[in-house]
Image (cartoon, grey):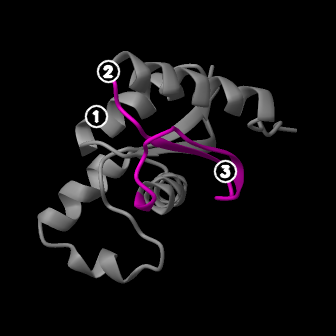
Amino acid sequence: MPTKRVLTLEAARRVVAAAEAEARKNNWAVSIAVLDDSGHMILFQRMDGAKLVATDIAIRKARTAVYFQGPTKDLEAEVAGGRTALLTIEGFMPLEGGVPLMSGGQLVGAVGVSGVSGAQDAQCAIVGAATIK
């Protein structure tokens, strides 16, 4: 019988710590959201100086990465390419900075980062996601 991997609070803390360290290294103030594989919040952190709107955007980026099981950068390209019907999905956030968290080939959650440019948000999210094995 196959076993399901889960994202623990401790693992979520490692994701946030790594993403935060990347942001601090670059003097960026961001919000970081880590969700489980069903799109529910495990951990959220807003760095000092991060814009308030980044809170909602980070959560929505993470949820979008969970629902589509891929980076939000790919969906940003889809919308730019004309798939505007995707914008009708409630809570959908097709902006770079949401990254799925994979463990042993299984989706266990996602991290969303917001507060700087999309590429910079993604840079932090990718560093955070790399802590999951």
- Nearest to the eye among marks 1 and 2: give it: 2
Q: Label 2 sits on what residue type? A: Asn
Residue extending furthest toward the top: 25
Quadrant of the image occupied by residue 6: top right
Is residue 107 or residue 114 the one in the foreground? 114
Q: Which residues are magenta?
A: 27-53
Q: Secondary structure at mark 2?
A: loop
Residue 78: where, in percent of width, then height? 21, 61
Judged from the image, the secondary structure of the residue bearing numbered disc 3 is loop
User: Which three-letter amino acid code belongs to the residue tagged 3?
Assistant: Asp
Provide the residue designation for mark 1. Answer: 120
Q: Verify CB contact (< 8 Å) between mark 1 and mark 2.
A: yes
Q: Label 2, label 3: how many angstroms apart (C-alpha)?
A: 29 Å
Q: Residue 102's quadrant in the figure?
A: top right
Q: Considering depth in this image, is 1 or 108 the residue closer to the camera?
A: 108
Using the rendered view, name the quadrant where residue 2 is placed. top right
- Secondary structure of the residue carrying tag 1 is helix
Lower position in the chain sequence, tag 1 or tag 2 = 2
- Nearer to me, 83 or 92: 92
Look at mark 3 in the image and give the residue it sits on: 37
Q: Quadrant of the C terminus?
A: top right
Q: Is residue 34 visible?
A: yes
Where does label 2 land, which residue?
Answer: 26
